[in-house]
Image (cartoon, rainbow, N blue to C red):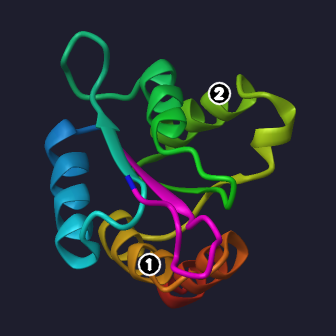
Amino acid sequence: MPESNGHGRARVSIVIVSHSPAVAKGTADLVRQMTGDDIGLEWCGGDPAGGLGSDAEAIGAAIEKVWSKSGVAIFVDLGGTEMNVELAIERMPQERRRKVVVCDAPIVEGAVVAGNLALSGANLRKIRSSVEEQSGI
């Protein structure tokens, strides 16, 4: 998957995490329709048994799959999911942790805006501040 923004820099990647695999996949599909294949995008949802929930191991694997030196913006649906995201981040090497952020924004709207900003070459800080400002949270 291309990481370059056309200016020789890697783009920020996005991970979408939901209690529901269908919500996570649907959100990722929407972002992909708007951005094409030009940004790193991954999703995960549900617990290991296939029910509603989230799984820190699956989240960590999703982050690794789309890792970018420019960072990874994560969007979550509910508080329990955020706790598993934080656990996944804590398990990462120290030098990578600072390049992974959870954006406090609605999962669908935030991910779509972040995808378009990433496509345009925005950095991780700009993406996070823009989606959080837009959501009013």
**To which residue does mark 2 refer?**
87
Q: Secondary structure at mark 1?
A: helix
Vertical arrangement, residue 134 with respect to residue 23, above or below? below
- Residue at point 42%, 48% (across, down): 78
**Residue 104: x, y in percent?**
56, 66
Measure the C-alpha gap from mark 1 to mark 2.
Answer: 28 Å
**Residue 114: x, y in percent?**
46, 75
For badge 2, the amino acid type reads: Leu
Quarter of the rendering containing residue 133: bottom right
Q: Secondary structure at mark 2?
A: helix
Q: Residue 9: within the magenta?
A: yes
The C terminus: image quadrant: bottom right
Q: Is residue 64 left or right of residue 15?
A: right
Q: Nearer the viewer, residue 52 or 123?
A: 123
**Residue 26: x, y in percent?**
15, 55
- Residue at point 47%, 31% (across, down): 59
**Residue 95: x, y in percent?**
85, 39
For badge 1, the amino acid type reads: Leu
Q: Tell me which numbered mark, 1 or 2, is placed earlier along the sequence.
A: 2
- Residue at point 85%, 33% (across, down): 94
The numbered mark at residue 119 is: 1
Quarter of the rendering containing residue 27: bottom left
Q: Residue 54: within the magenta?
A: no
Query: Which residues make up the magenta segment?
Result: 2-17
Q: Is residue 39 left or right of residue 4?
A: left
Q: Nearer the viewer, residue 137 or 32?
A: 32
Vertical arrangement, residue 80 with respect to residue 70, above or below? above
